[in-house]
């Protein structure tokens, strides 16, 4: 067995522990189907242990000054940065994501987010309200106490750290559930958190979603939960949580995101932006991928041909090689889901230009491979237009006039991201205001900017992350009226 991670214990109360059941879960390299490590198969008892540890730890953590918490968070960031190369190789082997962009994004984003929220913590202040002239009315922001983050498989370390930084800065203790298909980097993170943060402030419980995830959602000691994943799972979390208590839940869910191209654009530049925006380096496994390309009919054929040319040139192979552009998808089950979407597209009459199957070659007989795929002439009545694939599959459709483009862009249940490309700023802003998406780029694609809120409308979620709003979301507002008269 090619092991990439020797650390095999999760973190509860500042100690590296096995599951109370003594059971284990094996992680598979999606490029080779070989087992590469194992993690504890956590249980509801392990979740309860983590909640008890967090409940014990958070009052002292919250009692620290913002600058003292910031110092600890920066030590945490320094230690993650020091083991960046080790984490990188584990994540590539465990997720299938290609190493070149991961080197620049995943661990750096985790570190930068810790530093950002560490610096923002001292700005977590309330208001004084002139409700009366005789008295003093003020608000405070207080932490929930114990909060939980359920992380997805596409960026395990990044979401486990970057999306808990705000919670830590606000004075909460955190419980992280890593993804069951790509959990290995969390074992290294457990060692780092143990050595840099107070015991119980940061806890990691590995295991299956229907066991550990459900126990987190239904635990009465956890009132604040954040989740990234599919709308179906997000709705299940809302239902399950509502059965046991009143909880604050934020959801960043799926996307079927449109990139709308006006006829005044350079088709060659549009092709570059579209391929970049599709996130083929993550095999399209990104909620924000611009998976629907809406091109004005005047330049449709030129853009289509240019996109096909660029996608055909992408290099598929070993995700640990810097020469690779596209690696395997995350799991066998996910591969089968993606290929089923391609079958549906064929049946619905979309024109397949590339891909839609395993790549050819002996090296792709094992592993979870889907060739980069482009479908043309996709219309809103087709399933490929409406359903999120979460894979390397791009749908291209054409439009004639402004209102038609808006209707096509808004025709799905999703509303996470969108992009508008044109040299006419008036048309761009008009289009951006009419699109029902939470995060929009004008003449840009699939970029995140630290401090800029990110989140979706419609079935793409509730709440915003990556900015000051996320910090506030990990607090409850308390009003105090001081009667002076």
Image (tube, rainbow, N blue to C red):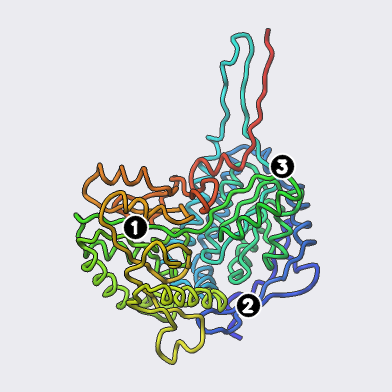
Side of 187 where 440 appears, left or right: left
Percent position (x, y) of residue 68?
60, 41
Residue 173 sits above or below residue 209 on the image: above
Side of 80 where 409 appears, left or right: left
Disc assigned to residue 60: 3
Residue for point 46% across, 77% down: 343
- Can you identify the residue that label 1 sits on? 259
Percent position (x, y) of residue 196?
63, 55
Quarter of the rendering occupied by the C terminus: top right
Q: Dot 1: within a 10 Å radius of its alpha carbon, few (fewer than 14), some, or many (20 or more) residues?
A: many
- Can you identify the residue that label 2 sits on? 37
Q: Counting residues from the N terminus, which is met first, the one under dot 2 or under dot 3?
A: 2
Q: Residue 472 occupies which quadrant of the picture?
A: top right
Residue for point 60% across, 55% down: 227
Q: For numbered disc 3, what is the local secondary structure?
A: helix
For marks 3 and 1, give the one nearer the viewer.
Answer: 1
Rounded to the nearest angstrom, the CA distance separating label 3 from label 1 is 47 Å
Quarter of the rendering occupied by the N terminus: bottom right
Q: For numbered disc 1, what is the local secondary structure?
A: strand
Camera-nearest residue between 269 and 389:
389
Q: Dot 2: within a 10 Å radius of its alpha carbon, few (fewer than 14), some, or many (20 or more) residues?
A: many
Q: For numbered disc 2, what is the local secondary structure?
A: strand
Disc assigned to residue 301: none
């Amino acid at each position: 067995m090619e092991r990439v991670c020797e650390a095999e214990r999760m973190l509860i109360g500042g100690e590296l522990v096995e599951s109370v059941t003594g059971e284990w879960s094996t992680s598979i390299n999606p490029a080779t189907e070989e087992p590469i490590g194992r993690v504890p198969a956590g249980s509801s008892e392990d979740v309860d242990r983590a909640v008890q540890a967090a409940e014990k730890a958070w009052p002292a953590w919250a009692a620290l000054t913002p600058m003292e918490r910031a110092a600890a968070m920066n030590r945490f960031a320094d230690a993650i940065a020091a083991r960046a190369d080790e984490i990188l190789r584990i994540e590539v082997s465990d997720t299938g994501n290609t190493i070149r962009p991961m080197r620049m994004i995943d661990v750096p984003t985790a570190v930068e987010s810790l530093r950002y929220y560490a610096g923002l913590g001292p700005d977590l202040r309330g208001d004084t309200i002139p409700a009366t002239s005789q008295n003093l009315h003020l608000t405070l922001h207080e932490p929930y106490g114990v909060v939980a983050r359920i992380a997805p498989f596409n960026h395990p370390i990044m979401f486990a750290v970057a999306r808990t930084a705000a919670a830590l800065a606000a004075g909460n203790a955190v419980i992280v559930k890593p993804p069951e298909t790509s959990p290995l980097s969390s074992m290294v993170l457990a060692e780092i958190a143990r050595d840099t943060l107070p015991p119980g402030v940061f806890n990691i419980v590995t295991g299956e979603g229907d066991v550990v995830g459900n126990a987190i959602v239904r635990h009465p000691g956890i009132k604040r939960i954040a989740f990234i994943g599919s709308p179906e799972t997000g709705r299940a979390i809302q239902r399950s949580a509502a059965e046991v208590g009143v909880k604050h839940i934020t959801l960043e869910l799926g996307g079927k995101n449109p990139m709308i191209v006006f006829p005044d654009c350079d088709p060659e530049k549009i092709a570059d932006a579209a391929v970049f925006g599709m996130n083929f380096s993550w095999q399209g496994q990104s909620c924000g991928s611009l998976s629907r390309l809406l091109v004005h009919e005047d330049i449709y054929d030129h853009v289509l041909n240019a996109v096909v040319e660029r996608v055909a040139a992408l290099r598929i192979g070993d995700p640990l090689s810097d020469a690779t552009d596209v690696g395997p998808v995350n799991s066998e089950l996910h591969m089968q889901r993606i290929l089923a979407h391609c079958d549906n597209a064929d049946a619905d009459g979309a024109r397949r230009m590339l891909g839609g199957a395993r790549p050819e070659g002996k090296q792709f007989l094992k592993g979870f491979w889907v060739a980069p795929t482009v479908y043309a002439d996709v219309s809103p009545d087709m399933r490929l237009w409406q359903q999120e694939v979460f894979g390397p599959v791009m749908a291209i459709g054409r439009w004639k006039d402004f209102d038609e483009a808006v209707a096509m862009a808004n025709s799905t249940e999703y509303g996470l991201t969108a992009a508008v490309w044109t040299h006419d700023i008036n048309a761009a802003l008009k289009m951006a205001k009419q699109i029902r998406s939470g995060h929009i780029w004008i003449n840009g694609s699939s970029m995140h900017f630290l401090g800029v809120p990110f989140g979706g409308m419609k079935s793409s979620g509730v709440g915003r992350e990556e900015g000051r709003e996320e910090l506030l979301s990990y607090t409850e507002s308390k009003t105090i009226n001081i009667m002076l008269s």
